[in-house]
Amino acid sequence: MRLKRLWDRYHEAAKFLVVGGICFVVTTAVNYLLKLTVLHEKPVTALAFATVIATILSYVLNREWSFRTRGGREQHHEAALFFAVSAIGIGLNLIPLAVSRYVLELRVPDVSRPVQEIADFVSGIVLGTLVAMVFRLWAFKRFVFPHADVRPARSRPGPRSKLLRHEPRRPLARNRPKR
């Protein structure tokens, strides 16, 4: 009973954290893919691109799962607010990495390559993501999805779109058994 009360109270935050975990993996993978290939001289740009990609994924997952029953706004207005809040979150995410690289000068040749990479990971991926995540959770619930229980919860499993529902196949007239 106590666990159910906890879930009822914090289920949106728990789902938000799961979405955040998925987006964290996407951000990290794309960041290192870019940083180790085409953007090796521009780590802040690589992280910015990775974060933008993860933000788009985050919108879809948060709208359709984490905050499924929240809303209160037209979808285009909700999306605009989501991406405005996320843009602020991206800026918050980049600040620790920029400070690490350009203020504290934790970069090659001032430090070794392993120290630079650890500093980038801790400042950009870990610290930046935590700061942005706390801001986004607060801002999404406050501004983007402000009203609880305005959209109906899914009553049955399966796709919501009529385009994705599959009707049982009916045999063609020529394939029907003869009597």
Image: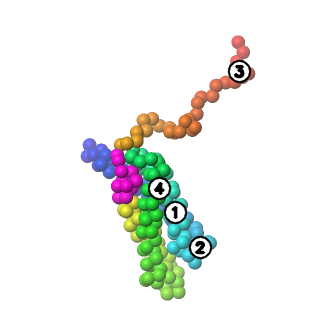
Question: x and y percent of residue 26 in the render?
Answer: 52, 61
Between the C-alphas of marks 1 and 3, the distance is: 52 Å
Is 139 contained in the magenta span? Answer: yes
Q: Which mark identifies residue 173?
A: 3
Front position in the image: 155 or 79: 79
> Residue at label 2?
39
Which mark is first along the chain, 3 or 1?
1
Crowd band around label 3 with a 10 angstrom C-alpha radius: few (<14), some (14–19), many (20+): few
> Residue at label 1?
52
- Prevalent SS, magenta region: helix
Which mark is first along the chain, 4 or 1?
1
Which mark is first along the chain, 3 or 4?
4
Between the C-alphas of marks 4 and 2, the distance is: 29 Å
Q: Is residue 75 visible?
A: yes
Which mark is first along the chain, 1 or 2?
2
Which mark is first along the chain, 2 or 4?
2
The residue positioned 43% from the left and 83% from the top of the image is 104
Quarter occupied by the C terminus: top right
The residue positioned 67% from the left and 24% from the top of the image is 171
Is 138 contained in the magenta span? Answer: yes
The residue positioned 58% from the left and 69% from the top of the image is 34
Q: Looking at the picture, which amino acid does disc 3 mark?
A: Ala
Q: Looking at the picture, which amino acid does disc 4 mark?
A: Ala
Question: x and y percent of residue 15 in the render?
Answer: 40, 51
Q: Looking at the picture, which amino acid does disc 2 mark?
A: Leu
Front of the two marks 1 and 4: 4
Q: Residue furthest bottom?
A: 110
The residue positioned 39% from the left and 44% from the top of the image is 69
Residues tagged 1 and 3 counted as in contact (Cβ below 8 A): no
> Residue at label 4?
80
Stretch of the chain drawn in magenta: 137-148
Front of the two marks 2 and 1: 1
